[in-house]
Image (cartoon, rainbow, N blue to C red):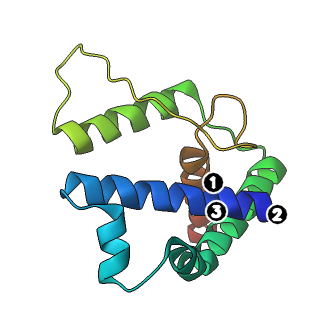
Amino acid sequence: PETMISSELDDQIAQLRTRLAQQGLEFGEYLASNDQTEADLREDLSEAAENRVRNTLVLQEVAKAEGLEVTEEDIDAEIEKLAREKLGYVRPGETAYVVLDPPEGAGPGVPSPLRNSSTAFSIASGFAST
């Protein structure tokens, strides 16, 4: 669906803006240095965005068909892993909180990337056992 691809493109550009800002670079300067407009950039990123959306939809359907669900423990473990990666540590007994804003259709309270990686792991595990 076009709206999902557009949303994915928006997310990719927002992430790029954030990475550039962290490096002290302006988005406009980045575009100028690459001799691009934002429309050009969106065009360049559109195939990758379409592939991500397609992969997400396929994994969601596989998860539904297989009855795979992400548990609260899975989410807590992923939050701790992300906190360790981003912060370098989480003190014993400390709770790590990550604000997650799942994309539309990701399911109630379940981060889509975590569900997708769990589904992909489940699929890979199934192949390994055959």
How many neighbours does mark 3 have within 10 angstroms: few (below 14), some (14-19), or many (20 or more)?
some
Single out the mark in the foreground, 2 or 1. Answer: 2
- Residue ID for mark 1: 119
Residue at horizontal 63 percent and vertical 54 percent from the top? 119
The mark nearer the N terminus, 2 or 1, is: 2
Q: For the residue labelled by badge 3, is the local secondary structure a helix, a strand or a loop?
A: helix
Residue at horizontal 18 percent and vertical 18 percent from the top? 92
Marks 3 and 2, how far apart at CA: 25 Å
For the N terminus, the image quarter is bottom right
Q: For the residue labelled by badge 1, is the local secondary structure a helix, a strand or a loop?
A: helix
How many neighbours does mark 1 have within 10 angstroms: few (below 14), some (14-19), or many (20 or more)?
many
| Residue 108 in view | yes
Single out the mark in the foreground, 1 or 3. Answer: 1
- Position of 63 with respect to 93 (left or right) is right
Question: Can you name the residue that lies furthest to the bottom here?
Answer: 35
- Position of 24 with respect to 41 (left or right) is left
The residue type indicated by label 3 comes to Ile
Verify CB contact (< 8 Å) between mark 3 and mark 2.
Answer: no
Vertically, is 104 above or below 46? above
Vertically, is 18 above or below 95? below
